[in-house]
Amino acid sequence: MSIEIHGAFALDEPPCRYGRSRLQCRGPLRRPEPPYFAFLGESETYGKYVKRPFAALLERDIGQVCINLGATNAGVDAYLGDDTLLEIAAGATQVVIQAMGAQNLTNRYYRVHPRRNDRFVAPEPALRQLFPEVDFTEIHFTRHLLAVLAGVSHRRYLSVAAELRQTWQERMSALLGILPRPPVLLWLRYDPGGGAWPEPVLVGQEMVVALAPALARVIEVPAEPAAVAGEMNAMIYAPAQAAAAARMIGQGAHYTIAEALAAALPQAPESKRPA
């Protein structure tokens, strides 16, 4: 169940939808009139719990319209199933894709929700056969699923992890193949702590390197979660979301990402900068 944030804890701009898309992206709603940059990614790209996501900061810094198509808890599957957002991305002068976690993909072991890709929908027969002792009825999220599987048998869990890595490679290649121009891959890395998998989950250097021929470039940005970086006072969250906000990157990390992107992406001429 999602929690709506109102009043003092609300962001300045509510989520928005583009055309026929069913994904909720970060507001404000922008008109995709070239030239513009487009950003695809999950909660970090969306800017969950922060006032100014890195796409907005980058627009201010380089003067280029930056359309934030990030969606909370989205994975590669969410974008591959969304023709509207793919069309907007295809029309962009430059696309930046966050390296999203491999756990949020439908694969031969389990299915995820088509838009909220962090939601575990059901196991496939192969997973039931591999883990016959696991009761899947009380598992609702992919991270919880992986934690349960690893706790039952690390050896058997490695088979699921290998499948997820291979699936990530295939889906990312499919996404890159749709775009008419090579995108930039933002490889944002951080450790949420508390025993959670480092972000992006199960995505290693060899996987990123394998995509390099289809990319304009890879921009690697290490970061820290808001609690470790001492940024909780700048986060925007309801009291019930404090733990989740503590594990998410804070406003300072967004400034760092925007600076790294600004150094790599072309700036708009002064005469063409948005008012």
Image (spheres, helix red, strand yellow):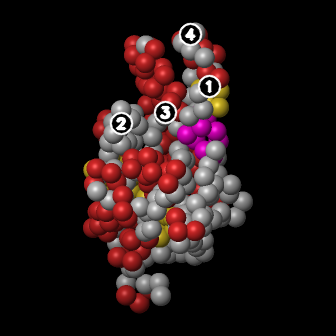
Label located before the other in sequence (4 or 1): 4
Residue 194 circle label: 2
Q: Amino acid at mark 1?
A: Glu
Residue 143 circle label: 3
Helix, strand or loop at label 2? It is loop
Residue 51 point in image, percent of width and height: 45, 68
Using a 10 Å C-alpha cutoff, classify the residue at mark 2 as few (fewer than 14 neighbours), some (14 to 19) or many (20 or more).
few
> In the image, what residue occupies the spot 47% across and 84% down?
274
Range of residues picked out in magenta: 112-120
* Alpha carbon distance from label 4 to label 2: 26 Å
The residue that mark 1 highlights is: 138
Question: Residue lying furthest bottom in this view?
Answer: 271
Using a 10 Å C-alpha cutoff, classify the residue at mark 3 as few (fewer than 14 neighbours), some (14 to 19) or many (20 or more).
some
| Pointer 4 with pointer 1, Cβ within 8 A | no
Whether residue 78 can be seen here: yes
> In the image, what residue occupies the spot 53% across and 72% down?
12
Helix, strand or loop at label 3? It is helix
Describe residue 145's horizontal placement relative to residue 53 as left or right.
right
Residue 70 point in image, percent of width and height: 52, 57
The residue that mark 4 highlights is: 133
Helix, strand or loop at label 1? It is helix
Residue 236 circle label: none
* Alpha carbon distance from label 4 to label 1: 13 Å
Label located before the other in sequence (4 or 2): 4
Relative to the observer, which residue lies in front, 15 or 194?
194
* Alpha carbon distance from label 3 to label 1: 13 Å
Residue 28 point in image, percent of width and height: 57, 72
Question: Residue lying furthest front in this view?
Answer: 239
